Every structure is written in C-alpha cells, then in structure tokens.
Image (spheres, rainbow, N blue to C red):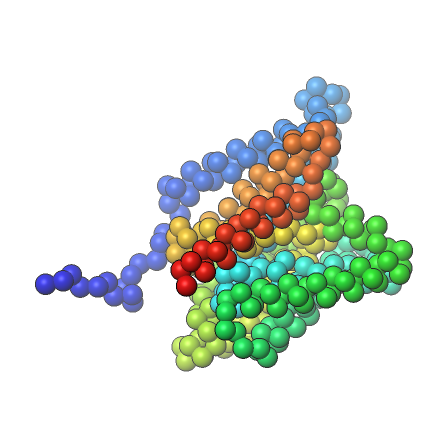
Amino acid sequence: MSPKAPNPATRKRPPILSVSFFLACLVVSGLLLLSLVTGQYDVFGQADGADIFAITRIPRTLALILAGAAMAMSGLVMQMLTQNRFVEPSTTGTTEWASLGLLFMLYFFPAANILQQMAAAVTFAFIGSMVFFLFLRRISLRSSLIVPLVGIMLGAVISAFTTFFALQTNLLQSLGVWMAGSFTSVIQGQYEVLWLVLLVLALIFYYADRLTLAGLGQDTATSLGLNYSQILLIGTALIAMASGVVTVVVGSLPFVGLIVPNLVSLWRGDDLRSNLPWVALTGIALVTVCDLLGRTLIAPFEIPVSVILGMVGAVLFIGMILKGRARA
C-alpha cells in the first residue's frame, strides 16, 4: 500500500527564525563590519578619523542595509502581483519612472530638498507601476518571458524620453551622476530618508498572507475572499515607495529584486511570510558584497555598485531563462 500524500492544508510553513537564519545573520554582520573598515582613508590613524567614520562609513553601511532589503523585498512583492519570477522594479520600468520624477523636480523645482525629490520619485514610480499593470491586462500572456519584455520595453521608452529631456535642458550630467547606482555620495544628512523603507518592510510583512493569495491569480484570490484590486493598489504603492526612496538616495540597483527572491524560493519554497527575513538578509548581503568589490577591485578608485550588480544579475537572469526553457 502506497504511503498517503501529505495534506497541503495541514502542512506547516517553514519557521521564520532558525539556527541557520542566526548563522546567516552572523555572516552578514561580518560583511557589514568589513564595510565599516574598508576605505582609502585611515579612520583609525588620523586625528579626524572618528568624525569621518561617523559622517561617511556608518551612513554608507546603514544605506547598504536599507537599500538592499528594500529592493529585494520590492522584487518579491512585484513577482507575487504579476505571478512571474522574471520581474522586479528594474525590469518593469519602475526605476525609469522614478528617474523621470527626479528629473522633473531637478528642472521645474531646482531648489527642492531631498524629501520633495523623494515625493516626486515615489509618485512617478507609482504611476509607472500602474501603467505596467494596465499593459499586462491588455495583452495575452502566453509565455513567462512576455511580462519582463513588456516591462523592459516600457522602461526603455521612458528612459529614452528622460534622456532626451535631460539633454535638451542641460541636465544629462546631473541625471547621470544621480542615477549611477553608487553609495559613494551617501553621507550623514543625505541618507536619512532611507529610514522610510522600514515602514515599507513592516507593511509588506503585515500584508504578506494577502500578497501570497494575490499571487494565486485574480480569480482564485477573489474566490477566497480577497479584495484583489485593493491589495494590488497597496502592493504597487509599497513598491513605488521603496523604489523611489532608493533611487533618490543611491540611484539604480538593478536585478537585486530579481536575483534574491528566486534564490530564496529555490531553497525554501514560496511561503512569502517565512521567506521575508531571508529575502531581506540576502538582499543586504548581495548589495554589501557588490559594494565591497566596487571599493577594492580598482582601489583607490571605485566601481559603481550598479555596474557589478548589472553584470551578476544579467548572468543569473540568462541562466534562469535557459533553465526555464530546459524544463519546458
């Protein structure tokens, strides 16, 4: 007699906290400590070393934590809402819309402070994300690759318009510097708005179960009593806020939201709530490692972290596509 298959209704979700999670926290803490002591300026041997440490090293490391966690979890939420593992803010045009909002403020309100710039970036990112979802409703999704292709094409159009506008208004260099995707300019007094992503992370955790239901599709989620339109709006707003804030402070961090959720899902399955701490921790680790490589490979010069993330992400993205085709 064959053994009885386990009942999915009685299957326990993986524990959120475990020994392996605490070990992973120790590894990431080591990376963050390494980030604090890595740099060309000798903060331990100079008279003003303590001031430099407080002004630059600590804010930079905190920015690594907040930006890495925010972009990784934003990618996870977007994958749930689209039911597609190949999407994240940089493959759906959200980041490009945020940069357009930033350019809008640079041109029309050049004296705007960082909070006003962040508000514009978040607003434009939200509009762009909603436009992306509207596009998805209008097309027939016969392949999982169609969704990121639509997002990449939409993002390319917005990026071209942004570049043309910046060129015509002599803001191309300013926009390029702002969107470089580097933590070099993160100093005390210019990164604090990143703390807003803690609210985003808390709300994602609060809505985790509803986002998981939304990942089953509109018909299934609605039949289970979920207000699908409401959770889609909330999820889009959370993605826009995280992407807008990170774009204003750091710039573009491509593929973080694509790589991290897929790696965690391969290892732990698709339970959103129990995966969230792992996604945040892995996002922090990935961004920190790439930033350390950028600071040390050609020292005393620095490679923008977006360049290294783009290279790593592109390779893994192609690998995911090839693996999906092999299974098909």
| Observer-nearest of 293 and 223 | 293
Question: Looking at the picture, how far across and down is residue 35, in whole percent?
Answer: 61, 34
Q: Nearer the viewer, residue 99 or 28?
A: 99
Q: Nearer the viewer, residue 157 or 260?
A: 157
Q: Is residue 96 left or right of residue 202?
A: right
From the top left corner, tell me how far across and down residue 96 is, in percent.
Answer: 70, 61
Picture residue at 58% right of the left edge, 31% below the top: 34
Residue 222 falls in which quadrant of the image?
bottom left
Classify the position of the N terminus by image quarter: bottom left
Against 31, is 316 above or below?
below
Residue visible at 70% across and 29% down?
Answer: 299
Give the total number of marks visible in the rendering. 0
Q: Taking the image as drawn, is residue 198 in sight? A: no
Residue 122 versus residue 170: which sits nearer the camera? Answer: 170
Residue 264 higher or lower than 91, as above or below? above
Q: Residue at x 59, y 44 (%)?
A: 287
Q: Residue 31's x, y, as percent?
A: 55, 35
